[in-house]
Image (cartoon, rainbow, N blue to C red):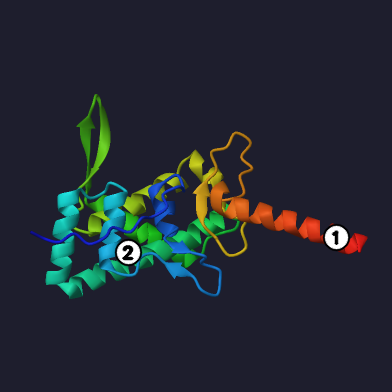
Amino acid sequence: MERRSPTPKFDLTAGCLCLDFANTVDDRLSRNPEDKLSGYPELVAFGRQTGVFSVSEAQNLRRQGRQDPGEASRLFAQALGVREMIFRIMTAVGNGSAASPADVAALNAALQELHRRSQLAPEYGHAAWRFLDNDRGAARLTGRILRSAAEVLTSGDIDRVRQCAAGTCSWLFLDRSRSRNRRWCDMRTCGSRNKARAYYQRKTGRTSASG
């Protein structure tokens, strides 16, 4: 029996797959960012946690990665390239600036390749796109992430893309609050830390002034 390796726990609070994937780096803007995707097994674990892979598929993919480490490294590098491209594009969107033409061209090229392997198919009384991206292997995760990014960029969600206001965080999320003024990726982490910092600064400022 294959021994199961520990599954990393990713924070899936961004509101969509592509932003959750972009957020697999903690404290990206700090001096010591932490990349949660340290290798191919973690990439498979992300796909398992997000429901792209079943338990048996994830086990098979990990086994295939050990059997063909060169291909696993290629797929992992490809996924990281997609992650960084999406992060840059969505950061520009969240900040109201223009994305790099090179990133836009790369995204379009990747999406064109995906659509080349797609077809319209009946689904519950209407037609839907069915993507024929081999429907197996780690590349399926990258395809799902790219389609998620396309859905965000071509829907009303594009106006909801935000970037965490915490100085070193940079995580992206969809602001689904009624007032659309959410500032933090998670109130329990960045939000509470920044509120505590602001309280401390106000308190010490008053103390210094009274002193």
- The residue wearing badge 1 is 207
* Circle 2 crowding by C-alpha within 10 Å: few under 14, some 14–19, many from 20: many
Marks 1 and 2, Cα distance to the nearest angstrom?
51 Å
Which secondary structure, mark 1?
Answer: helix
Whether residue 13 is visible: yes
Nearest to the eye among marks 1 and 2: give it: 1
Which secondary structure, mark 2?
Answer: helix
* Circle 1 crowding by C-alpha within 10 Å: few under 14, some 14–19, many from 20: few
Position of residue 198 relative to residue 63, above or below, is above
Q: Amino acid at mark 2?
A: Ala
Residue at the farthest front position: 211
Residue 79 disc label: 2
Give the left or right position of residue 121, taking residue 155 as reference: left
Query: In the rendering, at what x and y percent does residue 47 appear?
Result: 28, 54
Which one is earlier in the sequence, the residue at label 1 or at label 2?
2
Position of residue 148 relative to residue 71, above or below, is above
Depth check, front residue: 42 or 130:
42
Depth check, front residue: 147 or 50:
50
Position of residue 174 relative to residue 97, above or below, is above
Residue at the farthest left position: 1
Q: Residue at x 15, y 70 (%)?
A: 66
Q: Quadrant of the N terminus?
A: bottom left
Q: Residue at x 32, y 48 (%)?
A: 50
Depth check, front residue: 140 or 178:
178
Q: Residue at x 15, y 51 (%)?
A: 56
Residue 85 disc label: none
Q: Residue at x 52, y 60 (%)?
A: 99
Q: Amino acid at mark 1?
A: Thr
